Amino acid sequence: MKKAYICLDIGGTKVLGAVFDENLKIVCTVKKKTKAEEGQEKIEERITGIVEELIIKSQMNRESLAAIGAGAPGIINEGTGEIIFTPNIPWRNYNIKKVIEGRFNVPFHIGNDVKMGVLGEWKYGAGKGKENIVGIFVGTGIGGGVIINNKLYAGAKHSGTEVGHMIINTEGPYCNCGQRGCLEAYASKIAITREIRSQMLRGRKTILKELMGEDTTIIKSKVLKRAIDEKDELALEVVDKAVYYLAAGAGSLINIFNPNMLILGGGVFEALGSYMLPALQEKIKRFSMPAVLEGTEIVQSKLGDDSILYGSLALIMEKWGK
Amino acid sequence: MKKAYICLDIGGTKVLGAVFDENLKIVCTVKKKTKAEEGQEKIEERITGIVEELIIKSQMNRESLAAIGAGAPGIINEGTGEIIFTPNIPWRNYNIKKVIEGRFNVPFHIGNDVKMGVLGEWKYGAGKGKENIVGIFVGTGIGGGVIINNKLYAGAKHSGTEVGHMIINTEGPYCNCGQRGCLEAYASKIAITREIRSQMLRGRKTILKELMGEDTTIIKSKVLKRAIDEKDELALEVVDKAVYYLAAGAGSLINIFNPNMLILGGGVFEALGSYMLPALQEKIKRFSMPAVLEGTEIVQSKLGDDSILYGSLALIMEKWGK
């Protein structure tokens, strides 16, 4: 490898790292649990550990490492690398750029994970050549990214496109962010898990009881997929409900942005896209103005689990003007 | 007058026309009811009649008329001048550009009215120098406009920024557009009038009964203002409710766009801004993420009733590359 780039997808539940070679192909990956509950320093150690592991696993010369890129949840200053606020990891006004650059002595760039995912899809994936894109990524939480006039939209204060926190119902359930009735409070894995647990406590029959066992953490997307494949009544009910509210949120976003393309991504869509996408394409008609909806292609992320990695790579390239 | 521009604000209830001189100052205006219920041809006659009246009233030489600009509700192809869909006037796939240019023999440009209003505020009003702006205009309906990176955002199919049709409550009241729970179904003059009429039928005491009389059309903003000034209980209740839902919609839009500025305009804010703006600035805290809200100035339209006129002027200038 003449040149190598390390890209990180730092999520609320897991960290995925990859080495890209000079042809921008993924050479190897490493995946670890984030264990966000262990606090800022432990997460930091875990991340630098993954970078070290990737350097060793890819057998690169340390000198060939050109840059490190990353996506992480929340409000991130892409210029300074400061994480201002992140909802599912205990980072507040935390400068991760300093830490990583100090440790590895190469440029480090970081952006909001879903923004990076949408940037990746636009540059290398489903959205190539599309001028205006809205991306909704459904995972532990729900994030969004918007491409406007072939450029990632940043917003005034490094935030913006927090589509998971648009209000779907003013008196709806409380969200982690402190608001009520956010899209995230209806259709994220946090919301889906809460609904399933609550229905199981009410004695609803479901194979999810066996599949999830005593594990009290967020449901795994592949577990949900298995239950859907087996036509489990509760799983279908909960996922259909999530799709309905996703359609409401996505429908509003189409009314607001009238984009060329709406891209659905994130862990939930990676696992359940073949079930959820057609359902969403149908239900969204209820919520979008027909003349507006007409111009919008609704597709699934093409880079799948790697979209944030590719987006971090796109960010590195953008910072280099490539 | 060496050079004159005629600009039109074509609304669901009234048409306002103005002559601008070569210094871009308003020389004279004409205002007529739209009478949308009388159909496409009558509205057309009314509009050409207003242009004629403006030419005569301003005493201009017909040769000095350089261009005509306009803003109208709905989805409008700014390039061809075709009105694709308008919710409160019976225009469908209707080419108004041909009609006006055929009649007056000068270039005619038309855009969505609220987009024009926001363009006007950005070029000549409250939003001068702001890179990213979200505008919400509350009148008969609710429309929106967005400036992104110092440019009016158009969307993929001449639509976009239909912020009045974002879903505030999935099971909310039906909206004119056929959806349920749109912002417009809660906080527009249509919604406010429906709520007042319904409460009056239930015997609620209110000075609005006397002020509105037997008139069954949409309430006038100045009538609403008078009732608020006199602290009429029903008027306060209905307007407070509208502000609450406006705060929900505006809060979501701030989470989505993280703009430098949110501009509130339209007839309702022109009349009631001194009451509604501070209330909205407070209530929006409930719905916006604090770190995102922080970077957003929330202000009232500066050009007031003339914002759409100035926006049409800005559109004329933009088409000329000025």
Image: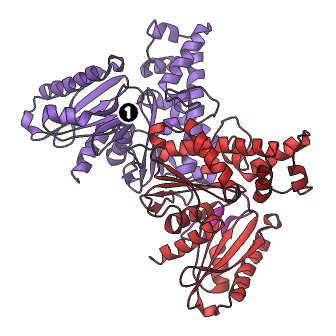
Chain colours: A red, B purple
Q: Is residue B92 left or right of residue A47?
A: left
Left or right: residue A225 versus residue A297 is right
Q: Is mark 1 on a helix, strand or loop?
A: loop
Tell me: residue A265, above or below residue A291.
below
Q: Which chain carries label 1?
A: B
Q: Write the residue at 59% across / 27% down.
A: B240
| Residue A84 part of the magenta segment | yes
In the image, residue B15 sits, relative to residue A258, either above or below, namely above
Q: Which residue is drawn at 26% across and 33% down?
A: B96
Type of the residue with mark 1: Pro
Q: Can residue B19 be seen in this view?
A: no
Q: Mark 1 points at which residue?
A: B73
Q: Nearer the viewer, residue B1 or B185?
A: B185
- The magenta stretch is A77-95
Q: Position of residue B232 (x, y in %)?
A: 56, 16
Q: Residue A281, image x and y in percent?
A: 58, 45
- Residue A108: x, y in percent? 59, 78
A12 displayed left or right of A304? right
Of the pair A38 and B45, the residue shown nearer to us: B45
Q: Is residue B165 magenta?
A: no
Quick check: can you spot residue B187? yes
Which corner quadrant holds the N terminus of chain B? top left
